[in-house]
Amino acid sequence: MNQGFVSTSVRRRQRGLSLFGLLIAAALIITVAIVAMRVVPSALEFMAIRGAVEKIVTSGATTPRDLQQAFDRFAAVDDITAIRGSDLIIEKLDTGTVVSFAYEKRVPLMGPVSLLIDYHGSSRQ
């Protein structure tokens, strides 16, 4: 019998993903998906805050109180709960008004594990 041909065809390396590799890959994908599902709403709220700050600076409001009230109106419409108008840092410069903000958001992941995100932004270009 010609066993040389059979042994070389059996010895060929198989390609693909093993069951153990598939389980590890699935666990990693699920972990990343869970973190993303928890972080995305916080990131969207940050973008809404940044957009509201840009809008109030260009709205024509002149006093800090007017800017804060304008932000509170945008926050009510956009469902912004992380900060209020009174949390804004308003500076009058020679080039115009600069509105800044900074806050921390704690995002619970699983059990005692949470993610702390430090957000900050400004209307300054």
Image: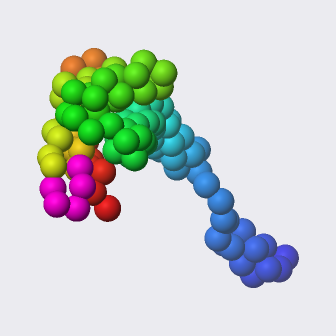
| Residue lying at 59% horizontally and 51% vertically, measured from the top left | 18
Q: Residue at position x 28%, y 29% from top?
A: 66
Q: Is residue 97 left or right of residue 38?
A: left
Relative to 23, does residue 74 appear above or below in the rendering?
above
Residue 88 lies in magenta, yes or no? no
Give percent across and percent down for residue 70: 36, 28
Image spot of residue 63 (x, y percent): 22, 35
**Quadrant, the N terminus:** bottom right
Q: Nearer the viewer, residue 98 or 101?
A: 98
Question: Along the horizontal axis of the image, is 73 left or right of 100?
Answer: right
Asked whether the viewer can see residue 13, the reply is yes
Q: Position of residue 54 (x, y in %)?
A: 38, 46
Image quarter where the C terminus lies is: bottom left
Q: Position of residue 44 (x, y in %)?
A: 45, 36
Q: Residue at x 66, y 65 (%)?
A: 15
Decide whether residue 96 is among the magenta residues. Answer: yes
59 with respect to 62 (left or right): right
Comparing 76 with 103, the one in front is 76
